[in-house]
Amino acid sequence: MRRDFINAGILWFVLTLAAELLLPVLFGMFPLAASEEAAVSDESFRLLMILGTPVFTFVVAVLIYSVINFRARDGALENGAPIRSNDRVAGLWLLVTGGLCVTVIVHPGLTGLAKFQGDRNADVVVKVTGRQWTWDLSYPEYNITGATEVVLPVNKRVKFEITSTDVLHSFWIPAFRNKMDAVPGLVTTMFVTPDKVASFAEDYNLRVQCTEICGLRHAAMSVPVRVVTLSEFEKWTQEKSILADNPVARGETLARSQACMACHSTDGSTLVGPTWRNLYGSPVVFEDGTTQTADEAFLLQFITDPDFKIIKGFPKGVMPQSFGKTLTADQLDDLIAYIKTLGPD
Ligand code: CUA
């Protein structure tokens, strides 16, 4: 009995040592961490792995030792000796694992949560609205709507105010680690303090990615993120405010924020709906064999009442019927102004 304890103990020690020595290799495989919260999150993960490994190797060591040492020998017909409980071992096991659980609930659990959500103040507010299948981004303090990328100043605390217009989505930027559900009818908040100047172009973990399955183009519900210096951020916000005076630029940002681009390409390729490249002024062929030129009046009618006629080769009832109600007349003009610029040149 005593020998079994010693042997299993040695096995446990060896397994634990090997696993703990391997952990830094695993930690080296973490993706880019680009925020203060990411550091907290990664540190928590490291701590949990370091604390959890001896518990795991203990179970594995006892299992391996028992399977080998107490196996049925050749010719053995009788059961082994009955196993009685050992109060000391059971009590110690409960004390150690229970103690570890309570410890990690307090730290990194509660302390980490306090760091993520404790300070409700923010230097920059970004409003995020999920919709099938895009993220509508705006910066109310800078009067910017329909941003096509998330641009954030480095070392400033950013508050995302997140909601959805249709189904559940989830707002996740892998390089920042934390994520938050986008729920229709509810505004959820997520705080982030980016601490590295970097962008999606350098590392694909700097992107918004929907992480709640939400339909056909869920995987495409992604927007690049760029962390810049404060002066670059101010320059960007100024440029965006100026662009807001240009109908074509307004139309383009609207097209992105309304998720038009999820179904209509601007490069001639066919997605769910017809491409916008060279659409304006060209003949559109309907299912019933008739044709009509895609002029301003046609575009307006089609955007506001997409099923008034079925375009050959495209299914009915896919495009939302609601744009006539949700977009203003000015917004519709901007959108058409943008489509017109996509050719024919
Ligand atoms: Cu939105 Cu998945």
Image (spheres, rainbow, N blue to C red):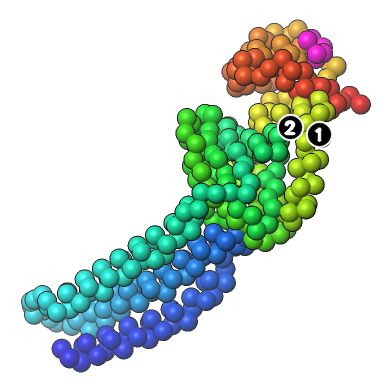
Residue 294 is inside the magenta segment? yes
53 or 273, nearer to the observer: 53
The one nearer the camera, 192 or 22, is 192
Which quadrant of the figure contains the N terminus? Answer: bottom left
Residue 230: in sight, yes or no?
A: yes
Q: Amino acid at mark 2?
A: Thr
Q: Which comes before the other along the chain, label 1 or label 2?
A: 1
Above or below 153: residue 163: above
Residue linked to disc 1: 243
Image side of residue 182 versus residue 255, left or right:
left
Residue ID at (39%, 66%)? 107
User: Is 337 placed left or right of 318 in the picture?
Assistant: right
Q: Position of residue 77 (x, y in %)?
A: 10, 78
Q: Quadrant of residue 29?
A: bottom right
Verify whether residue 125 appears in magenta. no
Ligand 1 within 8 Å, label 2 CB: no
Quarter of the rendering containing residue 331? top right
The residue at the point 69 percent across, 53 percent down is 153
For the point 58% across and 35% down, which residue is it?
129
Residue segment shown in magenta = 292-297
Badge 2: residue crowd in 10 Å (few <14, some 14–19, many ≥20): many
* Marks 1 & 2, CB-CB < 8 Å contact: yes
The residue beneath circle 2 is 253
Identify the residue at image location x=47%, y=34%.
186
Say what amino acid the circle numbered 1 marks: Leu
Q: Which mark is residue 7?
A: none
25 up-or-down from 234: above or below: below
Mark 1 residue element? helix
Q: Residues within 10 Å of mark 1 (few under 14, many from 20)?
A: some
281 and 108: which one is in front?
108
Q: Position of residue 299 (x, y in %)?
A: 75, 15
Q: Secondary structure at mark 2?
A: helix
